[in-house]
Image (cartoon, rainbow, N blue to C red):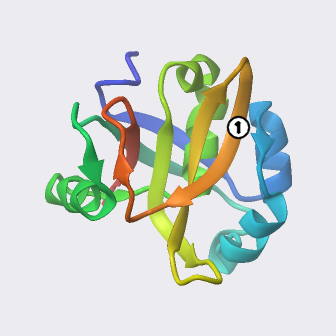
Amino acid sequence: MDAKNNEIKLIVDYSRSLQEMIEATDCDCMDDQALEKHFPLPTELRGKKVEISVKLFHFDRIIKGKYAISEINKNNFRPARPVEVLALVEAYPEIQKEFPIAALGSFWYDKYGFRLVYVLHFIKNSHMLCWDWLDNYWVDNCRFLGVHK
């Protein structure tokens, strides 16, 4: 299956901690304490395995975060959360080497009032889950994971 262009099914295993999910992807997390603090696993899903349908959105242009979210929503998807990006990368490990994958579905405010989201990068042969400003202009090779509503 071509995960870059088609809707695909994934299993999100909420019986694992975020740290276990990160380890399963073989990626480094820039600040895994912030990930645990700002994006806790939903209480109602803990201990469950949930099937979701996802799609990678590519706009082939520089795009502001709010416009990417709007486009994803117009297609009957919602922006993914970090845990859903981790599930994608676990299922398709090679995909993370091709382009950055942003999780715009949840954010937190830093001490300066900027909204931060997680994005997966492949930098110098290392998989890195790091945060970036939601309101940035996102580069034209970035992909945005959407989850079918």
The image shows residue 29 at horizontal and vertical percentages of 77, 47
Residue indicated by mark 1: 128
Residue at 85% over, 48% down: 20
Residue at 29% over, 25% down: 5
Q: Which secondary structure, mark 1?
A: strand
In this rendering, position of residue 110 left or right of residue 100:
right
Indicate the quadrant where residue 62 lies: top left
Is 117 located above or below residue 147 in the figure?
below
Residue at 37% over, 16% down: 2
The image shows residue 94 at horizontal and vertical percentages of 60, 17
Can residue 16 be spotted in the picture? no
The image shows residue 18 at horizontal and vertical percentages of 78, 57
Residue sitting nearer the eye, 140 or 85: 140
The image shows residue 126 at horizontal and vertical percentages of 75, 25
Amino acid of disc 1: Met
Q: Residue furthest front?
A: 112
> The C terminus appears in which quarter of the rendering?
bottom left
Residue sitting nearer the eye, 73 or 117: 117
Can residue 72 be spotted in the picture? yes
Residue at 61% over, 56% down: 131
Indicate the quadrant where residue 47 lies: bottom right
In this rendering, position of residue 34 left or right of residue 65:
right
